[in-house]
Structure formats: structure tokens, C-alpha cells
Image (cartoon, rainbow, N blue to C red):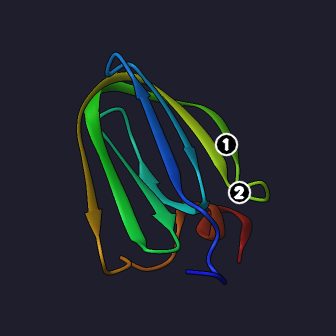
Amino acid sequence: MDNETQHTLTLINRTELSLTGINDIDSFNEQEIIAVCETGELVIKGELLHIEQLSVEAGIMSVSGKITSLSYNEKFTGTSVLKRLFGG
């Protein structure tokens, strides 16, 4: 894990989520956010989810809302939303 960016997750009262080590966002809506990190995809599920802060360059993201589930997938689903929007 020496060459990988450190990935951290801090959840406060299931309403405030702070993440580091985020490489990209694959998809997002009010019920689900799929974030790409070095080790795979992090699927965040909940209600009224909102990305408060996102800096792919710095690898940080903050999410607010009612968070009901956090799970990791080993595989990547494809082209990210940011790449599709900005022609990457």
C-alpha cells in the first residue's frame, strides 16, 4: 500500500461523511453516490444525499444527508460522471 493514496472515512451521527483518497465520482443522486478510490468503489446509500465538497485533485469529498449504508465494490463500473461531463 506504499504507492496508494491513503483512504479515510469519518462518519458523524450518520449525517456528515468526510472522505479522503477519492479519485473520482462514478455517479450520484439523492439516494446513492458511487465514489472511486484506490481500492475500488465506495457505494454510499441514504436519503437526501448532497455532495457538500468535492476536490478530485486533493482527493477529498464531504457528504451530508441521512446515510444508511456504506459498502465497497472491487470492480469499477466504467466512465465517471465527471469524465463524461468534461469529455475526459
Q: Is residue 74 left or right of residue 33?
A: left
User: Where on the picture, by quarter, is residue 32?
Assistant: top left
The residue shown at (60%, 69%) is: 84
On the image, the x and y values in percent for residue 61 come to: 60, 42
| Spot occupied by residue 28 in the image (x, y as percentages of width and height) | 42, 47
Q: What element carries label 2?
A: loop
User: Residue visible at 34% across and 16% down?
Assistant: 13
Callout 1 touching callout 2 (CB < 8 Å): yes
Measured along the vertical axis of the image, is residue 3 above or below residue 72? Answer: below
Q: Mark 1 = which residue?
A: 54
* Distance between mark 1 and mark 2 Cα atoms: 6 Å
The residue positioned 66% from the left and 83% from the top of the image is: 3
The residue located at (60%, 59%) in the rendering is 21
**x, y percent for residue 55:** 73, 48
Side (left or right) of 9 relative to 68? right
Left or right, 23 with respect to 8, comes to right
Q: Mark 2 points at which residue?
A: 56
